Image: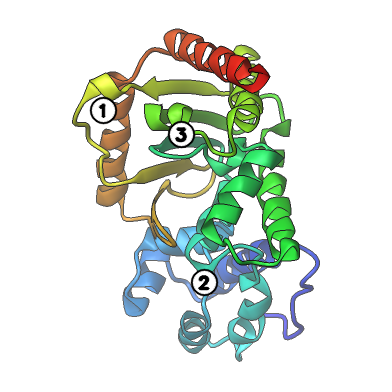
């Protein structure tokens, strides 16, 4: 194991994961065998090695002890753990950037990856009504930076189910909503995303507890992220991820088909355009 520290400017989490794989294989351990004394799954070790999960200091210290790496991981996990996102969302946001497919259920607001600047600003201002403008500007900047994931014409696959409340709640008023929903319609019509609307008339459904995001990867096990107000939890347990995947499948079955969903979104946009001109 090299003794020098990782360069924080060169994807430290990916580098740390690569070093972990080398150290584990040098020790002759499988992912499951390394995970057992750490009380984590083999799939979690795989996600650390792939750079989709964060390595926290206490875990890094234990890994150093088990693999006899002379404190390498404890010294370097700080750089790999740095994030511009809130603690409850950081691991999910960073995994999102590596995903080959993202499926998301949004019951109340437009998902961050699809938000326009004006919409995001209204959301953050509602969350933090007394924050200085500089703080809001920074939050908006970070949120918009996430949307660069969709700049590629094909990857990642993004499939979203919206609750109808997303369309009806006037975040920022008619002008902001016209732009925000028009942006989603444009992405749908250009075949960059798949979008479905779960109408009010669908009644009770499988995800009434809150939002849900599922992520799959080329070289790591899938993840599920469940988020509430200021909280979030990332799951890698296969049984839990499978249960959340079934929830998403049930949502898509109850939602309007993509063509009808786009037609509804565009109809709502027309209504907001009329209100904005009134």
Q: Which residue is mark 2?
A: 24
Q: Position of residue 277 (x, y in %)?
A: 67, 18
Q: Residue furthest left?
A: 204
Q: Position of residue 208 (x, y in %)?
A: 25, 40
Q: Quadrant of the N terminus?
A: bottom right
x 44%, y 62%: residue: 230
- Dot 3: few (<14), some (14–19), or many (≥20) neighbours within 10 Å? few
Mark closest to the chain's N terminus, 1 or 3: 3
On screen, residue 105 above or below 91: above
Q: How many marks?
A: 3
* Residue 111 position (above or below residue 83): above
Q: Which residue is mark 1?
A: 250
| Left-right relation of 30 to 176 | left
Q: Which image quadrant: the C terminus?
A: top right
Name the residue: 53% across, 72% down.
55
Q: CA distance from mark 1 to mark 3?
A: 24 Å
Q: Are marks 1 and 3 in contact (CB under 8 Å)?
A: no
Give the residue number, with chain letter if any, for mark 3: 169
State the SS at label 1: helix
- Would you place residue 37 above or below residue 229 in this image? below
Q: Nearer the viewer, residue 227 or 100?
A: 227
């Amino acid at each position: 194991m090299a003794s020098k520290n990782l360069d924080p400017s060169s994807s430290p989490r990916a580098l740390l994961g690569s070093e972990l794989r080398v150290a584990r294989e040098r020790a002759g351990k499988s992912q499951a065998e390394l995970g057992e004394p750490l009380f984590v799954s083999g799939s979690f070790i795989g996600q650390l090695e792939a750079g989709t999960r964060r390595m926290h200091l206490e875990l890094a210290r234990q890994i150093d002890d088990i693999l006899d790496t002379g404190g390498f991981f404890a010294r370097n996990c700080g750089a790999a753990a740095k994030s511009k996102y809130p603690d409850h969302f950081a691991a999910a946001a960073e995994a999102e950037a590596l995903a080959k497919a993202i499926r998301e259920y949004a019951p109340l607001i437009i998902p961050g990856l699809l938000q326009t600047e004006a919409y995001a600003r209204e959301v953050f201002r509602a969350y933090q009504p007394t924050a200085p403008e500089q703080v809001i500007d920074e939050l908006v900047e970070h949120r918009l930076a996430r949307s660069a994931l969709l700049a590629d014409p094909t990857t990642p696959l993004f499939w979203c189910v919206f609750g109808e409340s997303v369309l009806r709640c006037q975040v920022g008023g008619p002008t902001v909503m016209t732009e925000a929903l028009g942006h989603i319609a444009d992405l749908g019509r250009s075949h960059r995303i798949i979008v479905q609307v779960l109408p009010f008339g669908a009644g009770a459904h499988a995800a009434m507890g809150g939002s849900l995001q599922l992520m799959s990867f080329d070289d790591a096990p899938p993840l599920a992220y469940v988020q509430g107000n200021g909280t979030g939890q990332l799951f890698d347990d296969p049984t839990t991820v499978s249960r959340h995947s079934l929830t998403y499948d049930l949502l898509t079955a109850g939602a309007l088909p993509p063509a009808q969903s786009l037609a509804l979104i565009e109809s709502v946009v027309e209504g907001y355009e009329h209100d904005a001109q009134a």
